[in-house]
Image (cartoon, rainbow, N blue to C red):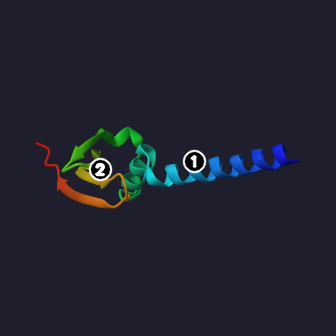
Amino acid sequence: MKKFMKTMVLAAIAAVGVTAFASAQGVTEQEALNSALARVPGATAANVTNFNRDYDNGRLEYEGEINYNGHEYDFEIDAATGNFTKWDVDRKWFR
């Protein structure tokens, strides 16, 4: 019985540790990409022309570009919080 209780306690500690580690990771690449696409109604992953991870001033961020419906959307997302630190929209003029 003691061995069973010890195993259960260790399993609980491991589960809490994994959960804490996962929350410390912030947002995933896919979550960041989904957040950016949600700001551009109608755009899909096919409209993403650039997307990568980068360190800026010691913090991890996701940066990318979406081209959709004649507009270019440039963004940066803080990987720890999921907050946008940059969101620029430019109208593309075609000749």
Q: Amino acid at mark 1?
A: Val
- Crowd around label 1: few <14 · some 14–19 · many ≥20 (10 Å): few
In this orientation, does residue 43 appear? no
* Image position of 62 (left or right of 88): right
Instruction: Tell me, for residue 64, which label it has, or none.
Output: none
Q: Residue at x 38, y 38 (%)?
A: 46
Q: Nearer the viewer, residue 46 or 59?
A: 59
| Circle 2: element type | loop
| Circle 1: element type | helix
Q: Position of residue 48 (x, y in %)?
A: 33, 41
In this orientation, does residue 94 appear? yes
- Crowd around label 2: few <14 · some 14–19 · many ≥20 (10 Å): few
Q: Position of residue 62 (x, y in %)?
A: 31, 47
Q: Residue at x 25, y 60 (%)?
A: 85
Q: Amino acid at mark 2?
A: Asn
* Image position of 2 (left or right of 47): right
Q: Nearer the viewer, residue 81 or 50?
A: 81
* Image position of 23 (left or right of 46): right
Q: Nearer the viewer, residue 50 or 79?
A: 79
Q: Residue at x 40, y 41 (%)?
A: 45
Q: Which residue is mark 2?
A: 69
**Foreground mark, 1 or 2?**
1
Q: Position of residue 37 (x, y in %)?
A: 39, 52
Instruction: Tell me, for residue 18, which label it has, or none.
Output: 1
* Above-or-below relation of 36 to 49: below
